[in-house]
Amino acid sequence: MTPRPLTTGLGLKPQHYGEALQCTAPGLWWEVHPENYLADGGPRLAYLDAIRARHPMALHGVSLSLAADAPPDAAHLGRLAALARRVEPVIVSEHLAWSTWRGQYLPDLLPFPRTHAALHRIASNIARTQDVLQRPIAIENPTHYLHIDGHAWAETDFLAELVRRTGCALLLDVNNVHISANNLGFCAQAYLDAFPLHAVAEIHLAGHHADPVHGNALLIDSHDAPVAPAVWALYQRVIERAGPIPTLIERDDNLPDFCELLGERDQAHHVLMAAHTEEAACS
């Protein structure tokens, strides 16, 4: 049987393991941070195996530190590869950021100047990761909070060049685009118009909030609220332009009831199903 294409998924959280295991929503898939499952056993891994037996699974890493000035940690890469063999994920993704310094892990995804040297270094780190995993990975566009000097590349061009050099895919986080456009003062739609959508393997949608001190002048990528109307509007335009792309609702904090999360997922699912219908009618 040919597997159905991915449609709309949710981030899997321990609070929802039982409901996730029983859920039969059509087209549902799940995504996890692999760092939470790099163990030899235990209840988390048992739930992951059980849910993976019923639904497709994706791995969304937060600690490869691909933009660091050193290669990804070999031991960590080995554990990630072992988990990927176990889970057989439909997508493996990581961030365009760095989070390690001289062997120390930092609790954030940090920015960098998009220089020619950074491009070469990150492309090398992506290639090394893909060689170990024996699969392409998808790279996520970052969230920005302040201007950084020294860029030689526009971000969309930088991402497109990474795709060209390494054969990687991209993960388009629409919430990140909205936040960065707000914080840095550029046009979100113009950024998306320049984005290499042909390389996008997955889309993320998430919530954000205004900074307590600066208000709406500084939006925070908090993943603790429903997807904002402005982000839904940008997402709709991306799908109208690119067609249906597998989409995930991210919620990492202030978790609502499972049925509320599923309702938000269904909203994105409706957008994708409409795009599938339109695509079929035109073929």
Image (cartoon, rainbow, N blue to C red):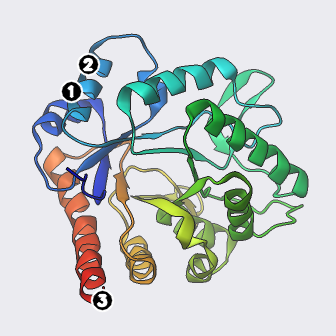
Q: Nearer the viewer, residue 17 or 200?
A: 200
Q: Nearer the viewer, residue 213 or 117?
A: 117
Mark 1 element type: helix
According to the picture, the residue beneath numbered tag 2 turns out to be 46
What is the spatial separation of the Cα atoms under label 2 and label 1, in whole angstroms? 6 Å
**What amino acid is at disc 1?**
Ala
What is the spatial separation of the Cα atoms under label 3 and label 1, in whole angstroms? 39 Å
Q: Residue at x 78, y 51 (%)?
A: 112
Q: Residue at x 57, y 46 (%)?
A: 136
Q: Residue at x 56, y 65 (%)?
A: 199
| Percent of width and height locating residue 13 | 30, 35
Q: Give the vertical position of 8 relative to 124 (above or below).
A: below
Q: Are marks 2 and 1 in contact (CB under 8 Å)?
A: yes
**What amino acid is at disc 2?**
Ala
According to the picture, the residue beneath numbered tag 1 turns out to be 50
- Give me the disc on residue 72: none
Count of numbered tags? 3
Q: Give the vertical position of 274 relative to 183 (above or below).
A: below
According to the picture, the residue beneath numbered tag 3 turns out to be 282
**What amino acid is at disc 3?**
Cys
The mark nearer the N terminus, 3 or 1, is 1
